[in-house]
Amino acid sequence: MNASARRALSVAALIIVSGLRLAARLLPFPLTRAIGRAAGLVVCGVLHKRRRLARDQVCAALGVNQAEGARVVRRMFLHFGESVAELLGLADAEVEETRRVEGLDHLHRALDLGRGALFVTAHLGNFELAVRGASWVGRPVSVLSKRFTSPLSQMIWRRLRLGGPTILDGAVSGRETIAALRRNEVVVFVLDQHDPGRRAVILPFFGRPAATSAALSRAARLSGAPVLPVFTVRKGGRHVVTVGAPLGVSATGSPRELALILTVEATNAIEAAIREAPEQWLWLHRRWKVSGPSGAGTGASEPRGGPPDLTGTRPQSG
């Protein structure tokens, strides 16, 4: 595809997404949500390979049979379609009305230290709405996000996120992350995807080895900011955001040891949250691409001698 065709396709996609957003705002919200669920079912029927991948990952992670795995995946597609519809159709004021936040005292105490706060979260529940129109945070919010390999997909997803938090490119945003924390702001790390970087920490996730970014650990070490597990799940018609107590961040040890300890804690928190609502996690990612033993630290966060850094996360697809 030549440059002119790519530009035309991008413009068409932009018009389509903008039209969908407008239509979602004009329709009664229950109808928008129902359309989203129906679209999720359609996508479930079309994406045969991804559906099977998700089912197999559910079965391996949760120890269920294929019928139960397929049921979880079907509900996941329904939930994801509904979540996209909400992202299109809800204004910030309506987001606030549909969200309940628990554990705010943990956030307040973290920000009182004046070093900012690091949120660790996952693609669980309607994670995009957790910090959208987030008056409950009380500070500016930035989210580290990996870029899609497709420029068109990247453009569409950024368009859907308009009005949300600041998006930082996870591959090159180390300085911006530390600067935001020094301004006592909040930076969000979504730590549930495979990290192909050589600095990744390899540790068990649902009992199987998985490569996880060590960027969070370095941000915590350099800034001194508390690390708070923050997850959202759909309960009835509301989105419940839970802010957990700060994860333990040791002041001693080598960068490699600290990276492993904190990343293990963060990964364990993510796994526990997913187990509470497995149908609301995005099982479509190829999370387990590592072969070998499943013990913590089977890989090294700094296999060639250097400390893990914020550029350790690289662009990736699905």
Image: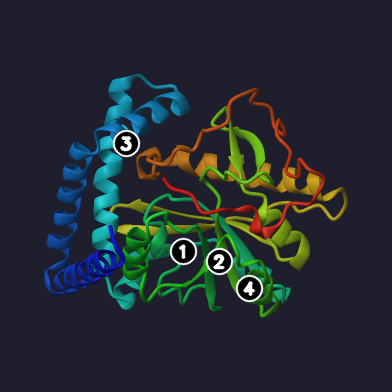
Q: Which residue is mark 4?
A: 176
**Place of residue 163 in the rendered image (x, y in percent of width and height, measured from the top left):** 37, 76
Q: Which residue is mark 2?
A: 104
Specify the amino acid type for callout 4: Glu
**Place of residue 117 in the rendered image (x, y in percent of width and height, measured from the top left):** 64, 67
How far, Cα to Cα, is label 2 from label 3? 37 Å
| Above-or-below relation of 78 to 18 | above
Q: Is residue 14 visible?
A: yes
In the drawing, does residue 113 fall left or right of residue 38?
right
How far, Cα to Cα, is label 2 from label 1? 7 Å
How far, Cα to Cα, is label 4 from label 3? 34 Å
Name the image quarter holding residue 59: top left
Contact (Cβ within 8 Å) of mark 4 with mark 3: no
The numbered disc on residue 50 is 3
Callout in the foreground (3, 1):
3
Q: Does label 2 or label 4 sit earlier along the sequence?
A: 2
**Place of residue 186 in the rendered image (x, y in percent of width and height, measured from the top left):** 59, 70
Name the image quarter holding residue 299: top right
Q: Which residue is mark 1?
A: 101
Quadrant into which the C terminus falls: top left
Element under label 1?
Answer: strand
Q: Nearer the viewer, residue 152 or 56?
A: 152
How far, Cα to Cα, is label 1 from label 4? 27 Å
Q: Residue at x 68, y 52 (%)?
A: 247
Q: Residue at x 17, y 74 (%)?
A: 22
How far, Cα to Cα, is label 2 from label 4? 25 Å
Q: Does label 1 or label 4 sit earlier along the sequence?
A: 1
How far, Cα to Cα, is label 3 from label 1? 33 Å
Specify the amino acid type for callout 3: Arg
Specify the amino acid type for callout 2: Leu
